[in-house]
Image: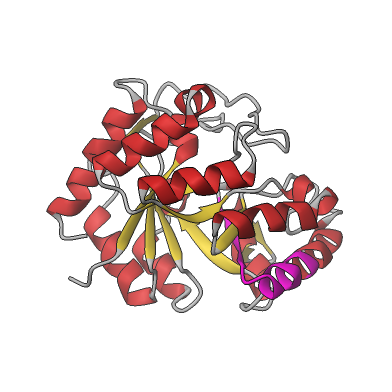
């Protein structure tokens, strides 16, 4: 199997990172990850984060940036990510009014065009990271497909979260292949259980905090390889589609400390050749 790099989404250990971001970065490197994906910087300036990354030996591949921050403070946000060396910035979600079919979708598209152009000029690729709600149908088409059809690939590429594709009753490997050449990063996230009435995740807000997730007692996040996701097929599809990075993300770790789960995930991925 072709060798690819694996990063860790720091949101998975957000409480630990809020207390000691440098310490978390050191532990991620010691576990064996090649890089990290950020979702906020916990008040640290870009030069400080850059120095830590260089000293520790981690690559900052990407960062989840709430859409309101891109709307209201784009140039400072891009400059921060240039300093720390991010190749990608990802929109983690659009609110209900901005999604395909919503009254603010046209305005959101204009913003994505503008942000994508600014990022591209700065040497950064803009991505969109899906949840499950983008798989609601709009005129017979999934909302996520509608979004990608409405934006040029050079301005907006895909960061496919395979957990939420599977949660939406689609085949993640098939969906990744659908975006061959447009999916540089694949999110690996595993779970057990079934869809409930409430969404089982929180959404990152512009200030770095989260809203409240609904309670779904049938659902539980797991380390990669310990849930229902066919990880091998997802990895194979990602490599075939041209992904250069796989990102481990576990929104919640109720059974063990997050970084212990991170170690289990990476060990599993190494066991299947990634």
Q: Quadrant of residue 43?
A: top right
- When the figure is inspected, residue 94 is found, relative to residue 255, above or below; the finding is below
Q: Is residue 28 magenta?
A: no
Residue drawn at x 28%, y 62% is 235
Q: In the image, 158: left or right of 139?
A: left
Asked if residue 156 can be seen in this view, the reply is: yes
Residue drawn at x 26%, y 53% is 230
Q: In the image, 73: left or right of 136?
A: right
| Residue range corresponding to the magenta coloring | 114-130
Residue drawn at x 79%, y 58% is 75
Residue 174 coordinates in the image, percent (x, y): 38, 68
- When the figure is inspected, residue 45 is found, relative to residue 254, above or below; the finding is below
Between 173 and 77, the one lying in front of the other is 77
Q: In the image, 39: left or right of 121?
A: left
Between 19 and 14, the one lying in front of the other is 19
Determine the residue located farthest toward the left in the rendered image: 271
Q: Quadrant of residue 4?
A: bottom left
Quarter of the image for the N terminus: give it. Answer: bottom left
Residue 245 coordinates in the image, percent (x, y): 38, 62
Asked if residue 102 can be seen in this view, the reply is: no
Quarter of the image for the C terminus: give it. Answer: bottom left
Residue 220 coordinates in the image, percent (x, y): 37, 29
Between 268 and 231, the one lying in front of the other is 268
Residue drawn at x 81%, y 50% is 73
């Amino acid at each position: 199997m072709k060798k690819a790099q694996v990063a860790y989404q720091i949101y998975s250990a957000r409480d630990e990172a809020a207390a000691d971001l440098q310490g978390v970065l050191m532990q991620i490197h010691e576990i064996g990850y090649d890089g990290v994906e950020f979702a906020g910087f916990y008040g640290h300036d870009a030069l400080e984060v850059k120095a830590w990354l260089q000293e520790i030996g981690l690559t900052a591949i990407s960062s989840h940036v709430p859409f309101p921050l891109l709307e209201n403070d784009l140039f400072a946000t891009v400059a921060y990510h240039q300093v720390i060396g991010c190749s990608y910035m990802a929109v983690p979600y659009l609110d209900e009014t901005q999604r395909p079919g919503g009254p603010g979708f046209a305005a959101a598209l204009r913003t994505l065009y503008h942000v994508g152009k600014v990022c591209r000029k700065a040497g950064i690729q803009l991505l969109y990271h899906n949840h499950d709600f983008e798989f609601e149908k709009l005129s017979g088409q999934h909302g996520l497909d509608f979004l990608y059809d409405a934006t040029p690939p050079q301005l907006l590429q895909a960061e496919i979260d395979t957990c939420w594709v599977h949660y939406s009753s689609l085949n993640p490997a098939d969906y990744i292949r659908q975006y061959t050449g447009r999916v540089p990063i694949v999110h690996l996230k595993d779970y057990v259980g079934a869809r409930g009435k409430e969404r089982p995740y929180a959404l990152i807000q512009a200030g770095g905090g989260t809203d409240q997730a609904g309670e779904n007692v049938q659902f539980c996040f797991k380390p990669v390889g310990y849930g229902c996701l066919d990880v091998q097929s997802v990895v194979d599809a990602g490599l075939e589609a041209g992904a250069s990075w796989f990102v481990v993300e576990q929104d919640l770790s109720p059974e063990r400390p997050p970084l212990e789960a991170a170690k289990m995930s990476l060990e599993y991925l190494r066991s299947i050749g990634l």
